[in-house]
């Protein structure tokens, strides 16, 4: 391992070119990021029916979420705080999608006509959005912990 | 088209940043292009095979097959990166000398190439799997939009490769005297980040429930979905909400690398 000052010199020596590259990269990515936001905004997810209480579970204690025509049903999942629970995500579309949520720290590919288990640990009260990454324009949902 | 571009771009970028670091690390070593290309090819083939058996894999181990497979792929990449980092920190000076005196592509250094090819294959495999499934879905759905989505996917690959190339150029612009120590640092952080990701996957599948709660949440400062967040996530393992065990894995890889480097360097005689 080199000394800290050597590492610093290393970094500072290459800063100009690296910076130029990074700026170019960032601005490119910023463009598609903004475009993506507009893309998603043009197709808002369908509003969920007003729900009373928590989302019901099946016999195995799992909440069943159906993905059909690239829309989650239910798209609003209400669960109590600090309670680990599983989502059984059934993909009824012909093609695969990825259940993706940064807030829930979950990434899981679910094949077409297949199903997958998403494990939620005990969560603090709040809203945790998720999406089907391959069809993010329509496949949007949220876990509401209250 | 735009949605396809973004999805493919993200995945290609995540793999591409790792390939960029690997290319920089193998600078001046003969036949490196062959090994890196071989790694990419193996990764793409592996991704296609895994995509075909996606459902069977998912159903293994009580529905956690996918997470376990991804975690293993990442763990293999971590081991290979640490090994390469050790090799570089002991041979970096020698490499520098040889590049300076004899010019490029003459260094006898097969050793790290296989390890680096495996790292490339692992990175491409992990990210490529999603691209393959996504694009297959588009093709299977058919229709007039398929062509435009395919174009978007292709543009995404180009854009991801272009940004990765910028990273590579940025690294190799570092003066020769410092480049190998800089790459050693980068490789160590890359390995640490991948180790934390691996643990994160296993924890999301319900394994290793110790220290599973997030230690902190910096998503209000920098979200992982943002551009900078994604790049930092890929390169140095930035995580907005790391669990305790993820942090342990991250620091553990750094400590192990530093300790091993010291241990190897203690005998002054350099073996090549």
Image (spheres, coloured by chain):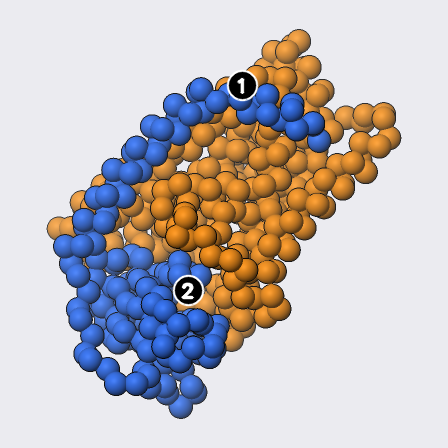
Chain colours: A blue, B orange
| Relative to A73, residue A100 above or below | above
Q: Which quadrant of the figure has residue A128?
A: bottom left
What residue is drawn where x is 15% and y is 58%?
A43
Which residue occupies the foreground of this view, A123 or A38?
A: A123
**Residue A138 in picture, x, y percent from top left:** 21, 62
In the displayed image of the protein, which residue is found farthest to the top? B101
The residue that disc 2 covers is: A104
Residue at left 27%, top 43%? Answer: A33
Can the viewer see residue B85 in this picture?
Answer: yes
**Residue bearing mark 1:** A13
Determine crowd level at label 1: few under 14, some 14-19, many 20+ residues with C-alpha closer than 10 A. Answer: some
Mark 2 Cα within 10 Å, few/some/many (few <14, many 20+)?
some
Question: In terms of depth relative to the viewer, which is nearer, B220 or B60?
Answer: B220
The residue under the point 15% across, 50% down is: B145
Q: Is A118 above or below relative to B82?
A: below
Horizontal side of residue B140 vs B67, given as left or right: left
Please name whichever residue, B211 or B105, is drawn nearer the observer in this view of the structure: B211
Residue A96 is at least partly visible in this image: no
Q: Position of residue B268 (x, y in %)?
A: 85, 26
Tag 1–tag 2 contact (CB < 8 Å): no
Label 2's element?
loop
Give the Cα separation between the discs numbered 1 and 2: 40 Å
Q: Quadrant of the N terminus of chain A?
A: top right
Q: Residue furthest bottom?
A: A59
Query: Which numbered disc covers residue B55?
Result: none
Q: Please count the marks in the image.
A: 2
Task: Give the letter of the chain under mark 1.
Answer: A
Answer above or below: position of A118 versus B3: below
For marks 1 and 2, the one nearer the N-term is 1
């Amino acid at each position: 391992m080199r000394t800290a000052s050597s590492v610093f010199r290393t970094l500072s020596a290459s800063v100009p070119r690296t910076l130029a590259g990074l700026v170019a990269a960032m601005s490119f990515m910023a463009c598609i990021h903004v475009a993506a936001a507009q893309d998603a905004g043009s197709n808002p997810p369908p509003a969920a029916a007003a729900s009373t209480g928590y989302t019901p579970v099946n016999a195995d204690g799992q909440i069943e979420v159906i993905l059909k025509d690239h829309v989650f049903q239910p798209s609003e999942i209400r669960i109590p705080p600090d309670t680990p629970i599983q989502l059984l995500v059934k993909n009824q579309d012909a093609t695969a999608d990825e259940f993706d949520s940064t807030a829930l720290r979950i990434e899981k590919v679910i094949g077409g006509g297949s199903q997958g288990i998403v494990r939620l640990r005990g969560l603090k009260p709040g809203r945790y959005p998720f999406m089907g990454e391959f069809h993010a324009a329509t496949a949007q949902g949220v876990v509401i912990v209250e | 088209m735009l949605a396809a571009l973004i999805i493919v771009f993200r995945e290609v970028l995540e793999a591409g940043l790792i390939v960029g670091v690997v290319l920089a690390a193998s600078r001046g070593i003969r036949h490196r292009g062959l090994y890196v290309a071989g790694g990419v090819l193996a990764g793409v083939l592996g991704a296609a095979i895994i995509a075909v058996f996606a459902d069977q894999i998912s159903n293994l181990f009580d529905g956690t097959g996918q997470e376990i497979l991804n975690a293993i792929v990442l763990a293999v990449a971590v081991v290979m990166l640490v090994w390469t980092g050790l090799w570089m920190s002991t041979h970096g000076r020698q490499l520098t000398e040889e590049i300076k005196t004899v010019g490029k592509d003459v260094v006898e250094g097969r050793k790290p190439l296989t390890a680096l090819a495996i790292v490339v294959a692992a990175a491409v495999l992990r990210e490529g799997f999603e691209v393959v499934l996504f694009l297959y879905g588009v093709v299977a759905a058919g229709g007039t939009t398929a062509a435009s989505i395919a174009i978007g996917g292709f543009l995404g690959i180009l854009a991801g490769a272009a940004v990765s190339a910028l990273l590579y150029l940025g690294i190799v612009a570092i003066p020769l005297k410092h480049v190998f120590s800089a790459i050693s640092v980068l490789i160590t952080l890359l390995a640490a980040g991948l180790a934390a990701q691996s643990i994160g996957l296993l924890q999301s599948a319900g394994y290793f429930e110790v220290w599973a709660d997030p230690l902190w949440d910096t998503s209000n400062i920098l979200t992982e979905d943002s551009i900078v967040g994604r790049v930092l996530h890929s390169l140095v393992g930035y995580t907005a909400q790391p669990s305790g065990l993820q942090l342990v894995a991250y620091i553990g890889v750094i400590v192990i690398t530093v300790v091993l480097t010291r241990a190897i360097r203690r005998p002054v005689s350099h073996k090549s």
